[in-house]
């Protein structure tokens, strides 16, 4: 096993894709679960902090160590089994999501979760319950995790399977493979009725596996995953529709969402919005973008009713005052990839512009319930405009999940943007939404989670962690501050 002890050698493990950075004494690169267990047992005895590292694409400092050691899982990167009959794949945690998806597609199978950044480790996507464009139809990673192996903070292991270990009336007993029983009390609070990646997933009756999915490495180290697959359908219609006013685009999205809810004829698998500022950012690379427009990107899987489906979409486009002739429609794989690149380009474009100007961006990850979404969106954009902050807004509007990125031009703007970010999160919480719909809490959004759930719930979350990690060594600082432990 490689152990890196020279700070110069492990600089890249001290940060992630956010601006957060930290320190560590050593970085371990175990090659087997057995080696992980040895490191963890030793750390548990000496009460040394462990931070688990995936591929470092996280946006909240979750894998950034604050002292202690780092366990990077990068060497555990094998696909272990593909069962085409029962449609599942078993994999070690450091298989890259894109590689796993390409591999199963070769076998005509489909793994739906698709965070924009697909260069992440599959184990980390479960640890953060990643989601993406296709979450609109298929839900988040949680829906596809059938089983996980986990190394707990004392070095014991648990194999958690869906439907096998149940939480009943907020309590559960988890038996480790070594025969010890851990009694847990699940925090009692109501999660928002939105897409959500803020804190633990907790319900009165639930599968215990769901406590670990999205727990950001605070409850254990995922060392193996069994993931559900679907049949692959490569017959997909992708489309970018341009609208000259936002209300038309919003009406189009609302109607598409409603139709999907009632299992209507059309059923988008992704439904996303880009405002006019976003399109201005993209225009240098995509000269064909019409001036003064916003747009909606959607994908529809096609079947034998292909013609009726396409016709239904064209009617909907027409009904909401857009021009199908001027829309970008892709049916073959190559054209679809181009539209997907277009959809993904904005995150890179914004990051590039921010880096060029040596600034920091401040981006929201909030979501609110559908009945208040449009008024919330209007309030939020007006707030930022009234404060003269440059911004772009885009994202998963099918799921009422906008990424509003403020682009402060100087330090004064930056401070103001931070204040606006707080106000936006506060309003989202007031409307019974969430402060993080997909990127999670990590170390950077703990104050917002506290605002969302209150101290009593945070204490209950900390107690849950302590039941699995009494010596407080694993991913300390993620989700809540250490003082709550
Ligand atoms: C441009 C860009 C776009 C993005 N778009 C999306 C998006 O659309 N949707 C989305 O959900 N996210 C998105 N992300 C965030 C990020 O890609 C995901 O959170 C991803 O799951 C992180 O994977 P990683 O391997 O890089 O994990 P890391 O950043 O290394 O770690 C993430 C967290 O998981 C923990 N962890 C990692 N592996 C394990 C394990 N095996 N067991 C227990 N804990 C573990 C770490 O300690 C850390 O807390 C985006 C990031 C970027 C840079």
Image (spheres, rainbow, N blue to C red):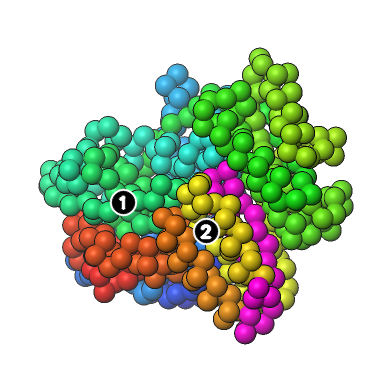
Quarter of image, res 448: bottom left
From the image, which quarter does the C terminus lie in? bottom left
Q: Which mark is residue 365?
A: 2
What stretch of residues is rendered in magenta? 386-413
Using the image, determine if residue 75 lies above or below residue 137. below
Residue sitting at x 45%, y 19%: 85
Q: Which residue is mark 1?
A: 190
Q: Position of residue 342 (x, y in %)?
A: 73, 48
Q: Position of residue 258 (x, y in %)?
A: 56, 34
Give the SS element for disc 1.
loop
Q: Nearer the viewer, mark 1 or mark 2?
A: 1
Using the image, determine if residue 293 lies above or below residue 28. above
Residue sitting at x 74%, y 28%: 315
Mark sitting earlier along the chain (1/2)? 1
Using the image, determine if residue 74 lies above or below residue 269. below
Residue sitting at x 74%, y 23%: 311
Quarter of image, res 255: top right
Q: Is residue 28 magenta?
A: no
Residue sitting at x 52%, y 62%: 59
Q: Are the two marked residues, 1 and 2, in contact with CB atoms closer than 8 angstroms?
A: no
């Amino acid at each position: 096993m490689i152990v890196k002890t020279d700070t110069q050698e492990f600089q890249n493990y001290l940060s992630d894709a956010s601006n957060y950075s930290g320190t560590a004494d050593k970085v371990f690169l175990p090659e087997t679960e057995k080696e992980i267990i040895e490191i963890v047992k030793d750390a548990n005895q000496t009460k040394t902090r462990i931070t688990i590292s995936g591929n470092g694409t996280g946006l909240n400092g979750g894998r950034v160590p604050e002292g202690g050691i780092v366990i990077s899982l990068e060497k555990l990167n094998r696909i272990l089994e593909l069962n085409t009959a029962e449609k599942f794949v078993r994999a070690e945690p450091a298989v890259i999501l894109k590689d796993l998806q390409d591999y199963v597609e070769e076998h005509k199978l489909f793994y739906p979760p698709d965070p924009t950044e697909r260069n992440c480790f599959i184990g980390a996507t479960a640890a953060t319950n990643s989601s993406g464009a296709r979450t609109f139809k298929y839900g988040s990673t949680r829906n596809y995790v059938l089983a996980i192996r986990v190394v707990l903070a004392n070095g014991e292991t648990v194999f958690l399977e869906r439907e096998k270990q149940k939480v009943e009336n907020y309590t559960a007993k988890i038996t480790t493979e070594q025969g010890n029983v851990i009694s847990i009390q699940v925090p009692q609070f109501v999660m928002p009725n939105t897409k959500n990646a803020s804190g633990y997933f907790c319900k009165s009756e639930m599968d215990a596996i769901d406590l670990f999915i999205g727990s950001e490495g605070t409850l254990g180290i995922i060392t193996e995953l069994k993931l559900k697959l679907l049949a692959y359908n490569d017959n997909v219609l992708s489309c970018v529709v341009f609208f000259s006013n936002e209300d038309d685009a919003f009406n189009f999205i609302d109607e598409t969402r409603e139709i999907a809810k009632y299992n209507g004829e059309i059923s988008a698998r992704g439904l996303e919005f880009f405002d006019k500022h976003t399109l201005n950012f993209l225009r240098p690379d995509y000269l064909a973008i019409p001036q003064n427009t916003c747009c909606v990107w959607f994908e529809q899987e096609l079947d034998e009713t292909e013609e009726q489906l396409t016709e239904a979409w064209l009617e909907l486009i027409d009904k909401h005052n857009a021009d199908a002739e001027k829309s970008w429609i892709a049916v073959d794989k190559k054209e679809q990839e181009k539209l997907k690149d277009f959809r993904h380009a904005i995150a890179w474009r914004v990051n590039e512009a921010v880096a060029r100007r040596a600034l920091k961006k401040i981006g929201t990850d909030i979501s609110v319930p559908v009945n208040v979404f449009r008024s919330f969106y209007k309030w939020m954009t007006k707030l930022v405009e009234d404060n003269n902050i440059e911004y772009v807004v885009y994202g998963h509007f099918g799921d009422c999940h906008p990424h509003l990125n403020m682009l402060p031009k100087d330090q004064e703007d930056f401070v103001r943007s931070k204040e606006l970010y707080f106000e936006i999160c506060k309003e989202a919480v007031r409307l019974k939404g969430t402060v993080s719909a997909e990127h999670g809490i990590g170390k950077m959004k703990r104050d917002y989670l506290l605002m969302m759930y209150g101290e009593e719930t945070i204490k209950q979350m900390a107690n849950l962690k302590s039941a699995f990690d009494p010596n407080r060594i694993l991913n300390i600082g993620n989700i809540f501050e250490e003082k709550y432990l």
